[in-house]
Amino acid sequence: MEDDFQVDLERVIDSIKEAEVISILFGMIRKSLVIDIRPSEEDPPIIRIAAQSRGPEDRLRYIRRQRPSLPRPTNVTMFPWSKSVDSFVRLGIFEQLMKRAADTGHPTLIQECEDALEELRRLERAEMVAVIRGENYYTVWSANS
């Protein structure tokens, strides 16, 4: 099922290596993983699971609210991830995020990345249960048609 969606892994990894702020939209769970690696004395780098944004400006406002003491980021990358959370790990994207976290020198950020991954997995499992139960989902056709 997941092979139907092509991902340019090299481009994604290059973006992660260079960006100050990374926002990855997990469409199935309607959440984004937001990583801001810019360091400052008052604000260490952060990783958050945020609500789906309406666009780049909405995401930048979110970053500004999370880290008001920092200037507007100069290099932001945003991309949708239409595959599963496990494929995000299996294809090496999460590993690249962990490398960026380690490069900041803030040991708490590594634990926050691991916690965020577990939360994404939990949200995805909950969404799959909702799909199976038919919660918040409607059929396109009925069995009586």
Image (cartoon, rainbow, N blue to C red):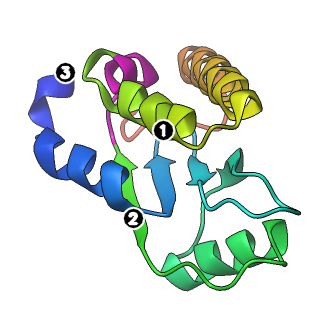
Residue 20, position in %: x, y?
Answer: 49, 64
Q: Is residue 140 visible?
A: yes
Mark 2 belongs to which amino acid?
Thr
Q: Residue at x 59, y 51 (%)?
A: 35
Tag of residue 28 = 1
Residue 86, position in %: x, y?
Answer: 40, 16
Q: Main SS type for the magenta part?
A: helix
Mark 3 belongs to which amino acid?
Met
Disc on the earlier residue, 1 or 3: 3
Which element is circle 1 on? loop
Residue 83 lies in the magenta stretch: yes
Q: Which residues are magenta?
A: 82-89
Counting other residues with Cα less than 10 Å from the Cα at mark 1, is it few (<14), some (14-19), or many (20 or more)? some
Which element is circle 2 on? strand
Q: Nearer the viewer, residue 72 or 118?
A: 72
Residue 145 lies in the magenta stretch: no
Q: Residue at x 35, y 50 (%)?
A: 16
Tag of residue 77 = 2
Disc on the earlier residue, 2 or 3: 3
Q: Is residue 15 left or right of residue 109?
A: left
Disc on the earlier residue, 1 or 2: 1
Q: Nearer the viewer, mark 1 or mark 2?
A: 2
Mark 1 belongs to which amino acid?
Met
Pointer 3: what residue?
1
* Figure quadrant of residue 7: top left
Residue 79, position in %: x, y?
Answer: 35, 57
Quadrant in which the N terminus is drawn: top left
